[in-house]
């Protein structure tokens, strides 16, 4: 018996309807990325940003926002995946 999608998903393509288009103008060089992070609470997204800082050079822990009518919190961080973060050599 197929139990269907997990409770936090409405189907295999559920995320496609909520992912916003990527603006290529923000990524001008190879290795630079902009990541939108969504989590259940502020502590979670701050922990994710701190972990990313350990691996890559990033823009740092940024402001966390709550969008009215939307669950969870959101933030954005930029990273240079070609340069090491705080744990780097």
Image (cartoon, helix red, strand yellow):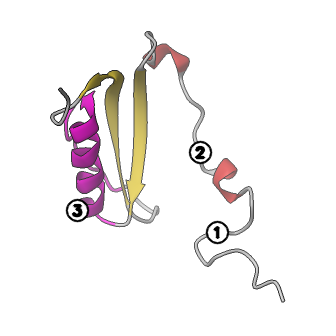
Residue at image position (61%, 78%) is 7
Q: Nearer the viewer, residue 59 or 88?
A: 88
Which residue is disc 1 drawn over?
9
Give the image quarter of residue 35.
Answer: top left
In the rendered image, residue 45 lying in the magenta stretch gets the answer yes
Using residue 12 as the reference point, say whether residue 88 is left or right of it: left
Q: Residues within 10 Å of mark 2 (few under 14, many from 20)?
A: few
Image x and y of residue 84, in percent: 25, 26
Using residue 14 as the reference point, say whether residue 19 is left or right of it: left
Residue 38 lies, with reference to residue 54, above or below; the image says: below
Q: Earlier in the sequence, mark 3 or mark 2?
A: 2
Magenta part of the protein: which range? 41-66
Q: Earlier in the sequence, mark 1 or mark 3?
A: 1
The kind of secondary structure element at disc 2 is loop
Check residue 43 in the rendering and tell me which mark sits there, or answer none.
Answer: 3
**What distance separates the C-alpha of mark 1 from that of mark 3?**
23 Å
Image x and y of residue 1, in percent: 84, 89
Q: Earlier in the sequence, mark 1 or mark 2?
A: 1
**What distance separates the C-alpha of mark 1 from that of mark 2?**
14 Å
């Amino acid at each position: 018996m197929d139990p269907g999608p997990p409770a936090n998903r409405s189907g295999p393509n559920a995320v496609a309807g909520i992912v916003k288009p990527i603006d290529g103008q923000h990524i001008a060089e190879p290795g630079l990325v902009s990541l939108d992070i969504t989590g259940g609470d502020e502590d979670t997204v701050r922990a994710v940003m701190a972990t990313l800082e350990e691996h890559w050079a990033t823009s740092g822990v940024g402001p966390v926002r709550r969008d009215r009518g939307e669950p969870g919190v959101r933030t954005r961080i930029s990273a240079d995946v070609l340069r090491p973060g705080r744990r780097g050599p």
